[in-house]
Amino acid sequence: MIKSSNGRFFIDPSAKIGVPLRFLQGCVVSKHTLDNTMVRLPKSLYIGPYAIIGENVTLGENTVIDAFCKVSSSVSIGKNTLLIYRAMVGGEAIIGEDCVIGGVIPERGIIGNRCKVFGNLVHTHNDSTMSWDHHEVPEPSVTINDDCFIGFGAQVIGGFEVGPKSYICSGAIITKCVPPYHIASGVNKIVHYSKWKGDLRNNPIFLQE
């Protein structure tokens, strides 16, 4: 167990920090990967039981990585962000400040500030014949802008953009851009919050300036 005297820095003894890149199908290791193996830890953080943190990861102040969460190599996570519910973050993803992540973030995915993501953000995998771990031209990853909410069980598939202050409902399947201040539900049913029938239109995220 690693902890500070003030109780603001804690790493569970079962957690693994700086785990090397896994050599999977088609993996290509660059010089950058081999030379950059340190993990940048802030003065205040919590890393729970059996969490896994890859190489060259940067964690912001007051980061919480809860039990069984996995952070792949070269990820950057902003301050005051919580990973929970066995969240998985793919390599080179960028997560902003004050976020709660409880789902899957793809490689090179970008998450803005103050987002809550409980669904799965994934690549399209249009070419199923390609090797699993290395593409000559990587598939584009989704960008989630500030103040978005993605509900439990939602599937966001592809390399498009979700505009700021948007809400993707639980169980939705979304494969195209979501404009700012919109609510997405079902299969690509996307409407401006003012046209939503129900209490969700009064969600404070749409009313904050």
Image (tube, rainbow, N blue to C red):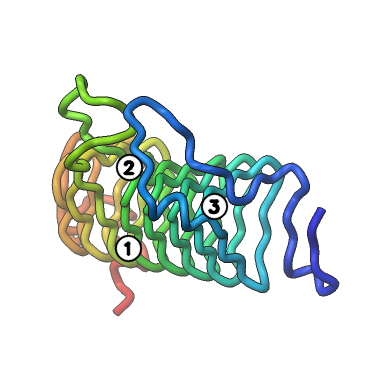
Identify the residue shown where x is 20% and y is 57%.
Answer: 182
Identify the residue shown where x is 61% and y is 59%.
Answer: 64
Disc on res. 121: 2
Q: Residue furthest bottom?
A: 209
| Number of numbered discs overlaid on the protein picture | 3
Mark 1 or mark 2: name the one nearer the start of the chain: 2
Circle 3 SS class: strand
Circle 1 SS class: helix
Mark 3 or mark 2: name the one nearer the start of the chain: 3
Mark 1 or mark 3: name the one nearer the start of the chain: 3
Residue of label 3: 83
Residue type at the position of mark 2:
Leu
**Location of residue 87 with respect to 65 vertically, above or below:** above
Identify the residue shown where x is 61% and y is 66%.
Answer: 41
The one of 8 and 181 positioned closer to us in this rendering: 8
Q: How crowded is the residue under tag 1: few (<14 C-alpha within 10 Å), some, or many (20+)? A: few
The one of 69 and 171 positioned closer to us in this rendering: 69
Which image quadrant for residue 195?
bottom left
Residue of label 1: 202
Name the spot of residue 209 as percent of width and height, x first.
29, 79
The one of 201 and 78 positioned closer to us in this rendering: 78
Identify the residue shown where x is 79% and y is 58%.
Answer: 2
